[in-house]
């Protein structure tokens, strides 16, 4: 007679992290041999606390080198660990804001329904030594009405071929923009906030670079609108620098996960 099968225990415990980091000195989120990455630092610290050889993380939005996060979400298979103990093992430029139990099988990337980012632009004539790592210095003409006009065109489903590198792994170039707007942050800084179901590589940075051309008067609003119909990458503007881009939050069926 064969052995009786054991009970089906289902998936084991899953935990969720809420993370903040300064991406300046990281080679992006994703673990890469020989490079300093956010994922690598977090997995190293978790493996110490959980006494495991490795603790693979899944993340809501993989960020490129230099990109920051205010409310990144990641998940791993295992029980939660004390935030204070985890942060004691992490370097100065990354911090965990929360570590808590999630529904069994929760996947920070697969289960996310949308992601939100912000891009900051300092519009004054003089550069800022204090904000140089967090905002793009734009001392040129910057017509706010033109920026608002560009942002108003974005909500909905569009073909963003013009806003991602020509050599890309993407096979689908349509994305649904849920919200997009420019807003002042203080007297001299503008922040572009955008939320979508998903983003393509460099998409937000090319959007910003192109919108700033409209704001400077070197491109018209109708020309910007034409790009949303799937024009070639060469017809859009430059890719804005990475250091002014911030991952804000991710949303799930249970709502948006935000830092407190």
Image (cartoon, helix red, strand yellow):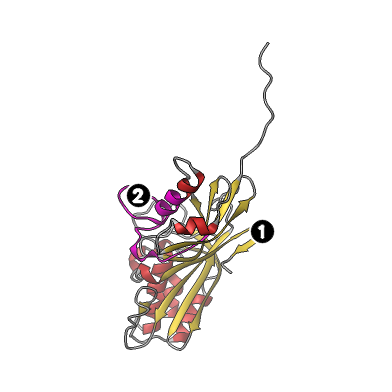
Density class for disc 1 (Cα within 10 Å; few <14, some 14-19, many ≥20) is few
Instruction: Name the residue furthest top.
Output: 1
Q: Name the residue under label 2.
A: 32
Q: Residue at x 37, y 63 (%)?
A: 232
For the C terminus, which image quadrant? bottom right
Where is 31 relative to 3, above or below? Answer: below
Residue 130 picture location, percent across and down:
36, 80
Between 69 and 13, the one nearer to me in the picture: 13
Q: In this view, does 199 lie to the left or right of 78?
A: left
Q: Give the residues in magenta.
A: 18-45
Where is 54 relative to 183, above or below? Answer: above
Residue 176 picture location, percent across and down:
54, 63
Between 147 and 83, the one nearer to me in the picture: 83
Q: Which of marks 1 and 2 is nearer the N terminus?
A: 2
Q: Mark 1 points at which residue?
A: 254
Asked whether the viewer can see residue 236, the reply is no
Residue 37, magenta (yes or no): yes
For the N terminus, which image quadrant? top right
Between 249 and 100, the one nearer to me in the picture: 100
Residue 124, magenta (yes or no): no
Density class for disc 2 (Cα within 10 Å; few <14, some 14-19, many ≥20) is few
Where is 10 relative to 125, above or below? Answer: above
| Contact, mark 1 vs mark 2 (Cβ under 8 Å) | no
Residue 214 picture location, percent across and down:
40, 80
Q: Is mark 1 on a helix, strand or loop?
A: loop
């Amino acid at each position: 007679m064969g052995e009786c099968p054991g009970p089906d225990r289902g998936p084991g415990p899953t935990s969720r992290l809420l993370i903040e980091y300064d991406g300046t000195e990281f080679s992006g989120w994703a673990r890469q041999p020989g490079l300093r990455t956010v994922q690598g630092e977090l997995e190293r610290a978790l493996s110490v606390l959980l006494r495991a050889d490795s603790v693979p993380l899944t993340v809501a939005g993989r960020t490129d080198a230099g990109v920051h996060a205010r409310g990144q979400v990641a998940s791993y298979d295992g029980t939660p660990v004390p935030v204070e103990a985890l942060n004691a093992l992490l370097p100065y430029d990354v911090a965990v804001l929360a570590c808590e139990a999630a529904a069994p099988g929760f996947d920070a990337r697969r289960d996310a329904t949308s992601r939100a980012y912000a891009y900051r632009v300092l519009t004054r004539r003089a550069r800022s030594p204090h904000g140089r790592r967090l905002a793009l210095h734009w001392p040129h003409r910057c017509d706010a009405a033109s920026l608002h006009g560009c942002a108003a065109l974005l909500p909905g489903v569009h073909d963003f071929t013009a806003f991602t590198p020509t050599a890309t792994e993407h096979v689908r170039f349509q994305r649904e923009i849920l919200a997009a707007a420019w807003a002042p942050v203080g007297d001299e800084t503008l922040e572009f906030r955008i939320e979508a179901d998903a983003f393509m590589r460099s998409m937000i940075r090319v959007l910003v670079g192109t919108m700033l051309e409209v704001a400077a008067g070197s491109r018209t609003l109708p020309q910007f609108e034409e790009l949303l119909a799937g024009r070639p990458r060469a017809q859009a503007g430059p890719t804005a620098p990475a250091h002014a881009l911030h991952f804000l939050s991710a949303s799930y069926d249970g709502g948006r996960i935000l830092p407190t």
